Image: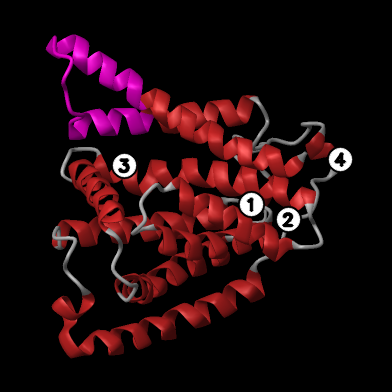
């Protein structure tokens, strides 16, 4: 059943993550000669790199996320540019919404604090940007849009928004951080819409990269997780939200106008008679 396959893809990704962390942790224990070793920033980066490349290889060879070069052949540079602009426009409204949520219970706060500490470790270790802004978006789009949402849309093609919402829920829960889940769910809706309209993960990767780059920069500038928009901008916080929406909403409209699925390749290209660029995942 396609819905179970979609759920299975997410579980497979989480298992790959856990195995990668276990391998790196085991090696660290062997090197240190101690059974009580916390993962360092470099350990986290190595496990993230291992997880990303393992995910791409597994999902490619098992054809869970098929290769398709057709979308980039349409030269969708306008869509990619507007994806970046939309991501820039949604950052401040998303932060404002996240900081306006009710306070979490203590046990959820502890999970959020642990996740925040892990994030800070990665950021302040060489190679942190590579993991957070480049590798994570690729791996997550391969799993949640290229595999899970693709299969959900095949299961219920007449209910695309219900399937997009379900994939966004998978995306939010898989972050394992209550503080990030509302933001991840909303981003999952937007990224799912982009995939549904284009049949490609390329625009979603561009959006995801911009979003994670902004998060990386903000965490470098304001490492205290208690810092709010009002602490940074004072009474201008609401003006910043309004200004950002004036960027985000027109960008969404432009994406609506420009996004479309690629047409099938000519028979000669399907047979490999014409030269083609190197294949990539669901591009």
**Badge 4 density bin: few <14, some 14–19, many ≥20, Cα 10 Å:** few
Q: Is residue 270 above or below residue 251?
A: above
Q: Earlier in the sequence, mark 1 or mark 4?
A: 1
Q: Is residue 137 above or below residue 79?
A: above
Q: Main secondary structure of the magenta part?
A: helix
Q: Earlier in the sequence, mark 4 or mark 2?
A: 2
Residue identifier under label 2: 262
Name the spot of residue 112 as percent of width and height, x first: 28, 52
Q: Earlier in the sequence, mark 3 or mark 2?
A: 3
Residue identifier under label 3: 130
Q: Are marks 3 and 2 in contact (CB under 8 Å)?
A: no
Q: Report whether 69 appears left or right of 22.
A: right
Residue 184 image-quadrant placement: bottom left
Q: Is residue 61 magenta?
A: no
Residue identifier under label 4: 267
Q: CA distance from mark 4 to mark 2?
A: 15 Å
Name the spot of residue 256 as percent of width and height, x first: 63, 74
Question: Nearer the observer, disc 3 or disc 2?
Answer: 3
Q: CA distance from mark 4 to mark 3?
A: 38 Å
Q: Earlier in the sequence, mark 1 or mark 2?
A: 1
Looking at the image, which residue is at 34% across and 72% down?
101
Q: CA distance from mark 3 to mark 2?
A: 30 Å
Q: CA distance from mark 1 to mark 2?
A: 9 Å
Residue identifier under label 1: 200
Question: Nearer the observer, disc 1 or disc 2?
Answer: 1
Question: Which residues lie in the magenta part?
Answer: 21-49
Q: CA distance from mark 1 to mark 4?
A: 21 Å
């Amino acid at each position: 059943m396609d819905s179970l396959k979609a759920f299975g893809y997410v579980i497979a990704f989480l298992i790959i993550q856990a195995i990668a962390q276990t391998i790196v942790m085991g090696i660290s224990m062997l090197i240190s000669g101690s059974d009580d070793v916390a993962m360092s920033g470099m350990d986290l980066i190595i496990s993230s790199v291992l997880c990303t490349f393992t995910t791409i290889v597994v999902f490619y060879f098992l054809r869970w996320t098929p290769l398709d070069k057709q979308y980039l052949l349409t030269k969708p540079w306008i869509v990619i540019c507007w994806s970046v602009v939309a991501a820039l426009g949604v950052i401040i409204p998303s932060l404002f919404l996240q900081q306006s949520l009710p306070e979490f219970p203590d046990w959820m706060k502890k999970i959020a604090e642990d996740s925040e500490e892990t994030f800070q470790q990665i950021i302040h270790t060489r190679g942190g940007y590579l993991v957070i802004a480049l590798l994570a978006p690729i791996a997550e789009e391969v799993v949640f849009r290229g595999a899970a949402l693709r299969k959900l849309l095949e299961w219920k093609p007449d209910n695309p928004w219900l399937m997009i919402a379900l994939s966004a829920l998978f995306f939010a829960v898989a972050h394992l951080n209550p503080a990030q889940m509302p933001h991840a769910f909303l981003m999952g809706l937007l990224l799912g819409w982009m995939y549904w309209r284009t049949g490609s993960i390329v625009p979603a990767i561009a959006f995801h990269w911009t979003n994670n780059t902004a998060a990386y920069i903000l965490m470098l500038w304001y490492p205290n997780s208690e810092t709010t928009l009002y602490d940074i901008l004072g009474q201008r916080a609401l003006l910043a939200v309004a200004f950002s929406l004036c960027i985000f909403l027109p960008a969404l409209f432009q994406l609506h106008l420009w996004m479309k699925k690629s047409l099938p390749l000519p028979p000669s290209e399907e047979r490999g008679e014409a030269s083609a660029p190197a294949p990539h995942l669901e591009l």
